[in-house]
Amino acid sequence: MRVAALYDVHGNLPALEAVLSDARCAEADVLVCGGDLVVGPCPAECLDLLQAQGERVRFLMGNCDREAIETPGDGELGESARWSNERLGADRLSSVSRWPRTVELDVPDLGRVLFCHATPASDLPILTRITPEDVVARALDGVAADVVVCGHTHVQYDRRVGSARLVNAGSVGMPYEGSPDARWAILEDGNVELVATAYDQEAALARLERAGFPLFERWLVGPLRGEISAEEATASFESRRGA
């Protein structure tokens, strides 16, 4: 059984197309869409493309997806959520509203795997590869799963805290890795593999810019030109976590 964990697409349709065309993903039995799919330049197209994969896809809710279906707040996230909401339409918004906050699967030789966006209890907390162990332990307290897979901070990692294993699958559409390649994870045969899929990011940027997403320059240009390193992003998230 192969599970592909695809997180934080953020409406980046070219990146999603590239990952779905990657033979490693095409051969997956299950695709877990780990949240933050539908706020970005091509929200409807990304949702339609994943829904076309049929029953092998499991969707879960991210904080940006939640913003898109609720009354958007203030600030840049509220602005982008409103823009995405208008492009999704009533039927797609209804579909998104039914997504659960977690998905659990039994993966052979890995055990019970819990997929969530940020933590099992909430789609907002920040857990990075350097978050203190006591903070991670509290976030995972009471979780019986053998592995927890998350996203939210757009940087891949695989770490153990006590008996818990926490994996961040990275971001398909907005990676903070010093490289523009789409990042995702494969769970199979007792292993977790953090992987990347290369694609033509300059062509993608030109295509995404035409969509008119209001935060195109602020959100997408830097990551898709490899201008944000994992170290910079991790430090930034940690500073926000401690605020």
Image (cartoon, helix red, strand yellow):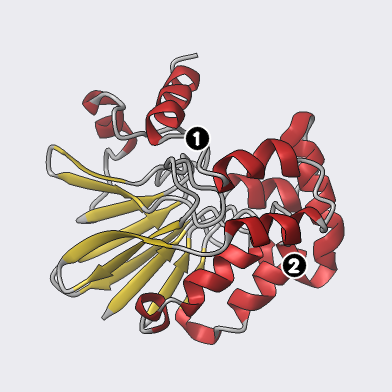
Label 1, secondary structure: give it.
loop
Which residue is farthest top?
Answer: 243
Q: Residue at x 18, y 75 (%)?
A: 108
Q: Residue at x 20, y 47 (%)?
A: 165
Q: Which of labels 2 and 1 is toward the front? A: 1
Q: Quadrant of residue 88?
A: bottom right
Amino acid at the residue labelled 2: Ala
Q: Quadrant of residue 97?
A: bottom right
Whether residue 229 sits left or right of residue 39 in the image: it is left
> Does label 2 or label 1 sit earlier along the sequence?
2
Amino acid at the residue labelled 1: Ile
- Give the camera-side residue of 121 and 48: 48
Q: Residue at x 16, y 74 (%)?
A: 189
Specify few, some or many for label 2: CA neighbours under 10 Å numbering under 14, 14-19, or 20 or more: many
Marks 2 and 1, Cα distance to the nearest angstrom? 27 Å
**Residue for badge 2:** 44
Q: Is residue 11 among what the camera can see?
A: no
Give how far across and how far down residue 238 sits, in percent: 42, 23
Q: Is residue 227 among what the camera can see?
A: yes
- Give the camera-side residue of 106 and 78: 78
Label 2, secondary structure: give it.
helix
- Give the camera-side residue of 229 and 45: 229
Give how far across and how far down residue 138 sits, in percent: 29, 31
| Residue 58 in the image: above or below residue 41 | below
**Residue for badge 1:** 228
